[in-house]
Amino acid sequence: MHDNNIIKLPTIILSANKDGDIILAADIIKQGGVVALPTETVYGLAAKGLCAESIKKIYQAKNRPQTNPVILHVSSLEQAYKLVNLSDLALRRFEKLSSLWPAALTIIAKKSNIVPDEVSFGLDTVALRMPNHETTLKIISLVNQPLAMPSANLSTRPSPTSASHVLSTLNNRIDAVLDGGECSLGLESSVVSIFDTQVYLLRLGTFSQQQIEDALEEKVVLSLNNKAKPLSPGQSFLHYSPKVAEIKFISFSEIMTYWQSDCSILLTKSQYELAASLSERPKDSITLNMPDEAIDYAKKFYDALYFFESAPQKPLILVEPEHKGGIWLAIKERMSKAADKCT
Ligand code: TXA
Ligand code: MG
């Protein structure tokens, strides 16, 4: 998509702590504008989800490939049910999963005819989520329709977990950003499709496969990286990639190859302590230590990537954490994608 139609007005910065700003954010969206809003996962770029013209502005502002559909965010189950067309089996699954909402969990089901083509581009399905964020739920209620909300970053770049991350790629391309501080989880939602005979987990998040299987009382098939025939279009695009000259994802066993170079390195605190006990890094090289708890690592990950964008440009080495399972799976998947330069 070309950039010639983007909004050139300065982006207004609003505060989620001011009632007047919350109402203004809702008004801008009601009038067809695009506003970045905080959620518990990452900031999303919101527009009226039932209005084709408004949704088009999201694609322009993000420079997002038109074939990558967006999630509709709802503030009530009543709103959600109007957007889907469920078989008996899908209805049972939808009831079980939506009982976990509001949460970092996106459900894909067959869409009803009120969902505009601009939401799901040629697919007969729609992705739905109720975010666990009081202010954004209030804005959805004020606008009185579901909000289309992909992550609020230029396409291919890391997802934003603060208002300043949003501005670093979308300043002057969107009407406003509502600053709600740092996102509490920091990774995008888990995405599950329920319309087929099988249930598929299409994107890992802080909700684990086990938690989803427990809620559904059935097995879920993991389908994350099917580039040839992706079940989720987003799987075929470059993602989460910071603007740095070069980026590599390595295992900790390779660390000494890079330790004495001037590369920037991102690793866990325990990995740092081990490597630093063997030798010091060169003066002026940048090393960023990350928490050893998955939930804390996830919260800081995109912030670390944005930090390296603004640091002196050196090749960036992402070191695979040695921790296993749970949220670490979602973190490692983001790391490997961030380092994957081929689309
Ligand atoms: O946590 C989140 O999910 C955040 C916040 C803002 O809610 N949103 C987000 O949206 O990450 P986005 O657009 O960056 O990622 C949505 C993913 C994309 O990979 C897209 O391809 C997939 O969901 N998706 C959307 N609709 C789909 C559909 N009908 N079928 C399959 N995949 C779909
Ligand atoms: Mg995204």
Image (cartoon, rainbow, N blue to C red):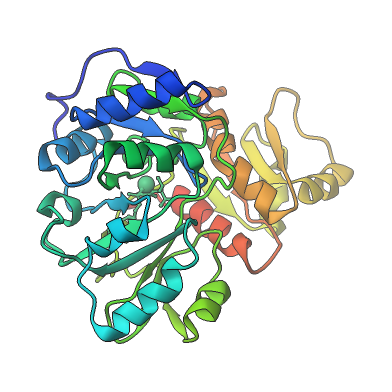
Q: Residue at point 31% right, 85% down?
A: 89
Question: Is 12 situated left or right of 254 in this image?
Answer: left
Q: Position of residue 209 (x, y in %)?
A: 53, 73
Q: Nearer the viewer, residue 242 or 39?
A: 39
**Picture coordinates of residue 51, whole percent (x, y):** 14, 42
Position of residue 179 measured from the top left corner of the image (x, y, whole percent)? 48, 26
Q: Quadrant of the N terminus?
A: top left
Task: Tell me which residue sits at (61%, 49%) in the image.
Answer: 298
| Residue 95 position (above or below residue 83) | below
Q: Residue at x 29, y 64 (%)?
A: 232
Pick whichever, 211 or 325, lies toward us.
Answer: 211
Left or right relative to 62: residue 287: right
Give the total number of marks visible in the rendering: 0
Looking at the image, which residue is at 28% across and 22% down?
175
Q: Nearer the viewer, residue 166 or 180?
A: 180
Visible in this render: residue 92? yes
Residue 273, how many percent across, how many down? 84, 45
Q: Is residue 241 above or below residue 123?
A: above
Camera-nearest residue between 37 and 209: 37
Outermost residue toward the right? 277
Q: Quadrant of residue 307?
A: top right
Q: Is residue 2 left or right of residue 34?
A: left
- Residue 79 position (above or below residue 231): above
Note whether residue 339 is visible. no
Figure quadrant of residue 331? bottom right
* Furthest-top residue in this view: 10
